Amino acid sequence: MASLMGTYYHNIDVKGRLNFPTKLREILGASFYVTKGLDQPCLTVYSEEEWDRLSAKVALIPEAKGSQIKRWLFSGAGILTPDKQGRVLIPQDLRMFAGLEKDVVVIGANNKAEIWDRARWDALNAAFDAKQMLETLEELGF
C-alpha cells in the first residue's frame, strides 16, 4: 500500500458527513475502517488490508492483557463507504469522542489516516517539540 500523506481541511455537515480527500480515498479503497485514536482524541482510518493486519495482531494478544485494547478498538469501529460525492458519514459516537463539530483536518499518517478537530490539530502542532522528535529518531537508529 502506498503511504497516506498530506493535510486536508474540510467541514462536517449537520448530518455528520465529511468530504473525504480524493487522494486518500484512492489509496484506502472503496470502503475503509474508522475507529477511536489510541493515543489522541482523534479518529484513525485504515484500509481494509491494514485493518485486517491490525485485527490479526490484536487477536494474538492474550485476553489478560488485550481485552481492554480489543474493547476500545473494536467497539467504536465502523466501515466508511464514500457516496458519489466522496462524502462519508462519521458515526455520532465517534464524532463526539474526537470533538468533531464543523472544522476538521484529515491527515495522512503513513499506513493510516487521521481525522482531527481543527482546533485540537492546531494545538497539537503548536506544542510540537522538534528536539524531542529528533532524540526519538536517534534512539530508533534513524
Image: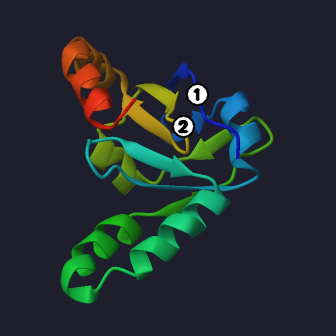
Viewer-closest of 64 and 107: 64
Upstream in sequence: badge 1 or badge 2: 1
CB under 8 Å between callouts 1 and 2?
yes
Q: In this picture, is 67 found above or below 4?
A: below
Question: Is 6 displayed left or right of 132 in the figure?
Answer: right
Query: What residue is drawn where x is 76% and y is 52%?
Result: 30
Query: What residue is drawn where x is 61% and y is 35%?
Result: 4
Name the residue beneath numbered marker 1: 5
Q: In this picture, is 123 found above or below 91?
A: above
Q: Give the crowd class for mark 1: few <14, some 14-19, many >=20 residues within 10 Å.
A: some
Query: What residue is drawn where x is 49% and y is 65%?
Result: 54
Helix, strand or loop status at disc 1: loop
Query: What residue is drawn where x is 56% and y is 66%?
Result: 53
Q: In this picture, is 122 found above or below 97?
A: above
Viewer-closest of 52 and 12: 52
Question: Is 112 displayed left or right of 97 in the figure?
Answer: right
> Can you name the residue that lies furthest to the front here?
141
Rounded to the nearest angstrom, the CA distance separating label 1 from label 2 is 6 Å
> Can you name the residue that lies furthest to the right here?
84
Name the residue beneath numbered marker 2: 110
Helix, strand or loop status at disc 2: loop
Question: Is 132 displayed left or right of 108 in the figure?
Answer: left
Q: Give the crowd class for mark 2: few <14, some 14-19, many >=20 residues within 10 Å.
A: few
Image position, residue 98 (x, y; %): 31, 42
Mark identifier at residue 127:
none
Image position, residue 94 (x, y; %): 37, 52
Image position, residue 107 (x, y; %): 50, 29
Viewer-closest of 93 and 14: 93
Q: How many marks?
A: 2
Image position, residue 133 (x, y; %): 27, 23
Report the amino acid beneath label 1: Met
Screen quadrant of the C terminus: top left
